[in-house]
Amino acid sequence: MLNINTALRFIDRFSAPQPVSAHCDLPCGVYDPAQARIEAESVKGCMEKYHGSDDADFKARAVAIKEERSEMVKHHLWVLWTDYFKPPHLETYPELHTLFWEATKLAGEAKKTTDVAKADELLAAIAGIDKIFWETKA
């Protein structure tokens, strides 16, 4: 028969917290600029639909959704920038700071306008980040 102290030591061995290293609270390891791109495409789509409608209520909804999606673009870019990219990436790609700064600024500007050209600029900036991201994943 197993005594209680032996049983508790056995349980502790398997249930004790183990040190881990991860990029976030949950070590999922899933990063992809596609998340930012999809939200940016939604921003552009809302802008296009805004210009294609004469309905004031529809336009107001399009603007609200566009602003929400613009903020989500910034969020996805910041996570990628702060959690995925590391100092060795900067050594290889010194333009990363500028690319992320410009992309997040464009996402902020997209919140303030319905100019589809601004959404195209945002998508182009994300494409630059995407290119480097996949080069670092290889």
Image (cartoon, helix red, strand yellow):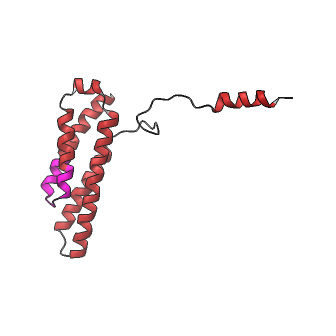
The total number of labels drawn is: 0
Q: Residue at x 29, y 37 (%)?
A: 81
Asked which quadrant contains residue 32, the reply is top left
Rendered residue at 30%/52% (across/down): 72
Q: Magenta stretch mostly in which secondary structure?
A: helix
Pick the quarter of the image with the C terminus: top left
Question: Is residue 86 at least partly visible in the picture?
Answer: yes
What residue appears at the point 40 percent right and 38 percent down from the top-left corner? 30
**Residue 35 placement, left or right of 10:** left
Q: Is residue 129 magenta?
A: no
Depth check: give the residue in front, 19 or 131: 19
Which one is nearer the viewer's eye here, 42 or 88? 88
Residue nearest the observer in this picture, 34 or 59 = 59
Above or below for 120 versus 8 = below
Q: Position of residue 61 (x, y in %)?
A: 27, 68
Residue most extreme to the front:
5
Q: Point out the image quarter for the N terminus.
A: top right
Q: Quadrant of residue 5?
A: top right
Q: Position of residue 36 (x, y in %)?
A: 29, 47
Please determine whether, in this image, residue 11 is positioned above or below residue 63: above
Question: Can residue 33 be seen by looking at this rendering?
Answer: no
- Find residue 92 and report its horizontal and vertical position in percent: 23, 24
The image shows residue 125 at horizontal and vertical percentages of: 19, 43
Q: Magenta stretch containing residue 121, yes or no?
A: yes
Instruction: Note whether 112 is above or below 81 in the view shown.
Output: below
Instruction: Write down the region rendered in magenta.
Output: 107-123
Query: In this image, 86 relative to 48: left or right?
Result: right
